[in-house]
Image (cartoon, coloured by chain):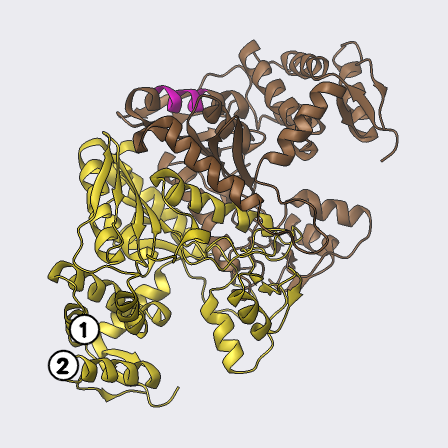
Chain colours: A brown, B yellow
Amino acid sequence: MTNHMRIRAEQLNELTALVMRRNGCNEAEATMVAEVLVEADLRGIFSHGTARLKRYVDHIASGIIRPNVEPKVVFESKMAAVYDGKGGVGQRIASIAMEKCLAIASSTGVGFCSVRNSNHYGIAGYYAEKATRQGFIGISTTNTAPLVVPTYSREPVLGTNPIAVSFPLNGRTFLLDMATSVVPRGKLEVYDRQSKEMPVGWAVDENGNSTNDPAVTLKALLNKLGGILPLGGLGEMFGGHKGYGLSLVVELLTAGLSQGEYSKETYSERGKICHFFGAIDPAIFGDREEVIKSLSRIVDDVVDSEKANGQSKIYYHGEKEALKRQNSLEKGIELDPKTVELLDKLADEFDIDRLKWEEGR
Amino acid sequence: MTNHMRIRAEQLNELTALVMRRNGCNEAEATMVAEVLVEADLRGIFSHGTARLKRYVDHIASGIIRPNVEPKVVFESKMAAVYDGKGGVGQRIASIAMEKCLAIASSTGVGFCSVRNSNHYGIAGYYAEKATRQGFIGISTTNTAPLVVPTYSREPVLGTNPIAVSFPLNGRTFLLDMATSVVPRGKLEVYDRQSKEMPVGWAVDENGNSTNDPAVTLKALLNKLGGILPLGGLGEMFGGHKGYGLSLVVELLTAGLSQGEYSKETYSERGKICHFFGAIDPAIFGDREEVIKSLSRIVDDVVDSEKANGQSKIYYHGEKEALKRQNSLEKGIELDPKTVELLDKLADEFDIDRLKWEEGR
C-alpha cells in the first residue's frame, strides 16, 4: 500500500457533489450521490466509493442515468408504495423510497417500498442503516447488471443482488450487507490484472464449467455466457442452490413486486435497476429497550465465542466498517493512486479545483 | 435403493397422530405433528419426516417437549404478536403463530410473529407455504440446536437456522427453504456411517481448522467445540461470513425479537427453540394478478436460461419437491427400511396396528 493520499470526508463530498452538478444533476441528486459514495469510502468499501464516480458520469453521458428527474409513486397502499424511478439517479430514488418506508413505518410500525426503473444505488447497507439510525430494523436490496449464473445454468441472468439487513443494538448497529454471489465482479478483475488463478468455485466458463482463469469468465461475459457463481458455488455440493435461491428472492422483491425488469433485462437503453426497502419498528414486538437489549445480548455472546486457532477476534457484521469509519473521520480517507488520479482528472474535466491531498500511507 | 416400502399418506398420517396421542399430545398437537412430518415425506425431505418421529417421542419422555400445553400471547401490537410456547409442541405452536400472522395480514396487509420457548417445528417451508396457499408471501425461520461455528470461531453457538421464503406464482409456489449452514448435521452422519471423507469446507475440528473426517467434527461437537460451517464455508474466501451473517439474522429475528434463547442456549432442560413468521400480501404493491404475473414471469425466464453442459433442467425452488409430492400422492410415499422398522417398533410399543406396507422400489 504505497502512495495512498489522504483527504477529509467533507472535501471529498464537496468534489463529488460538484462533479454530479456539472453533469446535470440537481442539488438533491448530487447531494445523495456524494453522501452514499463518500460513506462507502469512509467505511473502506472502496469498490463502491468515489472510485466509481467516473462510471456515474459515463452513465449520464450514455443516457443510462437521466439526471434531474423525480421518481413517481405509481401505487400506494397503507403499508407500501411502489416507485417508478424514470431512469433517474439511483441514490436519490433509493433515498426517497427509504424515507417513504420510514414515514409509513412511523405510523403503522412497518413499511415497504419496491422501485423500478432506477439505477445503481451504491452500497445497499447505506439505506438499511438509515432506517436503523432512526430505531428501525432496515432492509435494502437491489438487482444489478447480469453477472451470475443460476445453479445448472451457463447464462448470467441474475445480478450479484446484494441483501442488506440492519438491527439496532445498544449504541451500535448490526449491518449485514452481502452480495448473494460468492464474490463481486471486481474480485475477478483484480485477479485478472494480477494474472492470478482464481479459487475453483468462484466462476464458470461459457459452458457452465468451473474455471480458475478470471480472463475466461470475463471474456465469456462479453457474450452473455458464463459468469460468477451464487454464494455456495457450483452445483449443490456446497449449497450453490441456496445462493441461487437468495438471488432469485432479490429479483422477486425488487423487479417482481415493482413489475419492473429483472437483472438480465437491466442496462438496455436505460438502467432499469429495481430496489426493495423495508423498515420494521422493533417496538411492534415489545418494549423497545427490552427488545434492543435482547438483540444486543445475542450479538455480544456470539462474538464472545471461542476463537479458532490463530484468530484474535470474531466480528459482528458492520463492526469492521464502523471501526474503519471512525478512523477515516479522525484521520481522513485514504484513497489509492488510481482513484486519486481519476478524481483529479474529473476535477480538471469539469473545471473544479483539485482536492488538496495529503500524504497517506 | 432396495427394500423401500410404500404407504399412503393418509395411513402414515394416522399412525403418526396416534403415536403422538399416546404420548400425551392433545388432538390439535397430534394432528399438526402428523401433518408436518408427512408433508416432509411427501416432498422427499425424509430427514424431516416420520423418520424423526421417535425423536419427538423421546423429547416428550425427557421433558424437552411438554405435550398438551397451549402457547400464550405475551405481547401484541397492530402488526405483530409474540408467543411464549411454554415448552410445547413446535408444530402446533408454529401453526398457531402463522395463523396469527395471516389474521393480522388479512386486515393490515402485513403480519409478523416471533415465538420463544418452542420446540423443533419440522420443515420451515411448511409454514411459509401455508401463507402462500392463502395468497401471501410467506416467511418462516427458526433457530435450532447449536451446531454451526461463526466465522473465525471454533465454538458451535449458532444453529443450522433455516430460512424459508415463499411467493405465489401462477398456479405454483416459489419456495426457498434453506439451512444457513453449508450442510445439515445429518449429512455428516451419513458420511460417517459410510466411512467417507467429507469435502473440505463443510466442517471444522475442535480447533476451528478444516477437517474432512466427519467423525472428528461429530466427536468435537460432543464437547461443544468444532462444528458445521456457515453457507460459504471457512473464513471469507468463499463468503463464509455471509452465511454467518444470515445465521445471525435468524437468531435476531427469532430469539432476539421474542426475547428468548438463542441456539447456544437451546435444549437445556426444555427445547427453548425460537421461531419467526411473516405474511405479506402482494396486493399492497399493486393489482394482485398483475403482481403475481410479474413474479411468475421472472421465475419462468430464469429457469429458461441456457443450461450448463450436461444439465437438462434448471429448477426454481420448491419445484422438485412439488413434483415429488404429486408423485407420492399418486403412488404412495416410499420409506427406507430403517424408517419402516422404526415406525413398526413405535406401533408395537404404543399398541397400534402396524402399517400395511406395500412393496416399494
At mark 1, the secondary structure is helix
Estimate the x, y position of residue B281 in percent, counting from the top left.
26, 38
Q: Which residue is mark 2?
A: B352
In the image, residue A106 sits, relative to residue B306, either above or below, namely above
Q: Label 1 is found on which chain of the structure? A: B
Q: Is residue B327 left or right of residue B311?
A: left
The N terminus of chain B: image quadrant = bottom left
User: Image quadrant of residue A78?
Assistant: top left
Residue A98 in magenta?
yes
The kind of residue tagged 1 is Val
Q: Residues within 10 Å of mark 1 (few under 14, many from 20)?
A: many
* Label 2: which secondary element: loop
Q: Earlier in the sequence, mark 1 or mark 2?
A: 1
Q: Which residues are magenta?
A: A96-103
Number of on-image labels: 2
Q: Is residue B220 magenta?
A: no
Percent of width and height locating residue B240 = 59, 52
Residue under the point 77% across and 57% down: A197
Q: What percent of the width, then of the height, locates residue A137?
A: 42, 31
Vertical placement of A101 versus B90: above or below? above
